[in-house]
Image (cartoon, grey):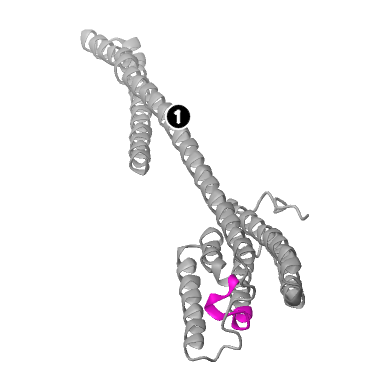
Amino acid sequence: MLNVNSLSKDADPELGRKSSILIKIIWSILLVINVSFIVNMFLQPEHVPRYLIILLLLWAVSIPLIVSTKKGHVSLSAYLYISFLLLMIFGFGWTGGGIKSHGSKILPIVVLFAGLTLGRKEIWLFGIAASLGGLALALADYYDVLPVKEALGQSPMTFWIYSVTAIFLLCYLENMSVEELRKSLRQAQEELSLRKESERVLEEKNKRLTEIAFLQSHVVRRPVANILGLSNLFNLDNPGDRVNAEVIPRLAVSAKELDEVIREIISRTEDIDSRSKEDHGISEERV
């Protein structure tokens, strides 16, 4: 059996998810239909050629589509596969009892495949197509143009086999849907946990930035202010002193330059702090 998970690791995760689902659906259809038809061949030996033709067509189309899906052509393969199944149901239904044919039992299930592999618009598209196809068979039966007006095989066992086929396919499909929902919920919970952790780190970072800003604006600038005050005091106390005339201006200039550097550091720290708070607000809105 072909490996379902052979897509490249660098591929889009959503593409890989849909690819895996489509391949599982194709294999499940092959398995269930093969078992169902093999059993019916023993119950209805007169229809063996019909069953063999259907199985041959099913395998001939399914295997290339599996290969195409593994190469990344997921949407195209899904469109082709669902369209093929609908055509098979309507085509063989024309000679198998019309809307009363056994294949009509899986029409809703085939339409649901589109929801798992394509999207919401596509499920409506194929749903409308299936409804119109069923209506065409019903009208053909009403106007008496069908070559066969009753389902092939009227025994209770035949009806039971086809009913079980539809039940198994529906159970498998629902199980797959629930599993995908659980995966989505787990992923959402993991993303929420990571976001909360990043917010906690961000809050801690903002707290430290606030402490640094306070340290720079109050603790570091205080000695600078003291130096400027002392230099002015020395200059006023003895303005004619030659040493004061040379040292005090340089000391004052250096202190002012240091004060400007501290102001720039404070400004940049406050800018980082405000940006962090803005990012934190955006993160909270997304949550």
Q: Residue at x 64, y 68 (%)?
A: 77
The residue located at (49%, 76%) in the rendering is 129
Q: In the rendered image, which quarter contains the C terminus?
A: top left
Looking at the image, residue 273 sits to the left or right of residue 57; the answer is: left
Q: Position of residue 189 (x, y in %)?
A: 46, 37
Residue under the point 48% across and 82% down: 138
Q: Is residue 19 above or below residue 153?
A: above
Residue under label 1, please give it: 197
Rendered view: 3 above or below 34: above
Note whether 63 is above or below 16 in the view shown: below
In this orientation, which residue lies closer to the viewer: 195 or 236? 195
Give, as a three-letter code, the residue at label 1: Glu
Secondary structure found at label 1: helix
Left/right of residue 163 with respect to residue 283 in the rendered view:
right
Dominant SS type (magenta): helix
User: Which residue is at the front of the view, 112 or 161?
Assistant: 161
Q: Residue at x 32, y 14 (%)?
A: 219
Counting other residues with Cα less than 10 Å from the Cα at mark 1, is it few (<14), some (14-19), or many (20 or more)?
Answer: few
Magenta-colored stretch includes residue 52:
no
Q: Quadrant of the N terminus?
A: bottom right
Find residue 69 and report its image quarter.
bottom right
Quarter of the image holding residue 201?
Answer: top left
Magenta residues span 91-102
| 215 or 109, nearer to the observer | 109
Tell me residue 203's x, y (percent). 38, 27
270 is higher (above) or lower (below) than 279: above
For this rendering, which residue is in front, 53 or 264?
53
What count of labels does the image hold?
1
From the viewer's perspective, tell me whether residue 55 is left or right of residue 131. Answer: right
Image coordinates of residue 48 in percent, x first then y, are 76, 74
